Amino acid sequence: MFIILRNLSLLNSYWSLIIPYVSFGIPMAVFILVSFFKGIPREREESAVIDGCGIYRTFFSIILPLVRSVIRR
């Protein structure tokens, strides 16, 4: 990583911190979020649709509060 950042002339800059954190952090966050979304029972989404919720209301009112503990960390 040091050699790559040195070749790009990014040493001693904020970009030398931002690039590694983003490149390693986002894939791990996506992996964790996908596993949590798969763990939510399909019946909860179906019951929200039966009650009249649209796709966005289902996501923000039902799904997002269930995975809030993962997003906060």
Image (tube, rainbow, N blue to C red):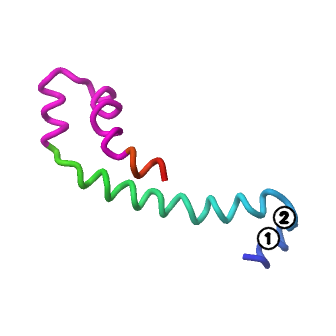
- As rendered, which of 20 and 71 lies closer to the eye? 71
Q: At 48% across and 63% down in the image, what residue appears?
A: 28
The reply to whether dot 2 and dot 1 touch (C-beta < 8 Å) is yes
Is 17 situated left or right of 9 in this image? left
**Inter-mark Cα distance, 2 to 1:** 5 Å
Question: Which label number is shown at residue 66?
Answer: none
Percent position (x, y) of residue 58?
A: 27, 31
Q: In the picture shown, does residue 49 fall above or below 4? A: above
Percent position (x, y) of residue 46?
A: 14, 35
Q: Which residue is mark 2?
A: 10
Q: Earlier in the sequence, mark 2 or mark 1?
A: 1
**Could you say which quadrant of the image residue 60 lies in?**
top left
Is 59 situated left or right of 28 in this image? left
Question: Which label number is shown at residue 5?
Answer: 1
Is residue 49 one of those drawn in magenta? yes
Q: Please report the bounds of the magenta region as a residue range.
A: 43-67
Q: In the picture shown, does residue 13 fall above or below 60? A: below
Q: Which kind of residue does numbered mark 1 sit on?
A: Leu
Q: Which kind of residue does numbered mark 2 sit on?
A: Leu
